[in-house]
Amino acid sequence: MIVLPDDGAPRVGARVNAVIGEALRQSVADAVPSAGFAARLAAALDAAAGTAADAAGGPAAQAVKALAASS
């Protein structure tokens, strides 16, 4: 358990969150998602963006297709 001081708690909390976020970012920096995962993620992002009717042609799906084509 991490106990934060009361004085300046929001500042300290923000720094703790930043350190944790950076550690997580570095831990997945070299990860390469499979094509299937990338396609499912793109469809989910497009659906969340309101393009669920045409998720296969939404902006995230198009970005995944462009990335795959450039590889």
Image: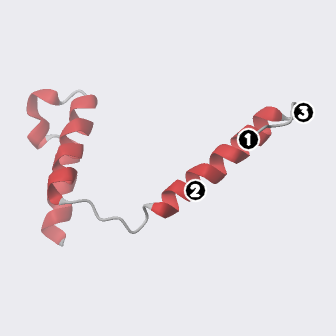
CA gap, disc 3 and disc 1: 15 Å
Q: Position of residue 39 (x, y in %)?
A: 16, 49
Q: Position of residue 18 (x, y in %)?
A: 64, 49
- The residue at 51%/55% (across/down) is 24
Query: Are the residues flagged by discs 3 and 1 in contact, CB closer than 8 Å?
Result: no
Vertical placement of 45 versus 25: above or below? above
Q: Which residue is mark 1?
A: 2
Q: Which residue is mark 3?
A: 7
Query: Are the residues flagged by discs 2 and 1 in contact, CB closer than 8 Å?
Result: no
Q: Which residue is mark 2?
A: 22
Q: Residues within 10 Å of mark 1 (few under 14, many from 20)?
A: few
Vertical placement of 31 versus 42: above or below? below
Q: Give the mark nearer the N terminus: 3 vs 1.
A: 1
Query: Does residue 58 appear to the left or right of 11 in the view shown?
Result: left
The amino acid type of the residue labelled 1 equals Ile
SS assignment at label 1: loop
The amino acid type of the residue labelled 2 equals Glu
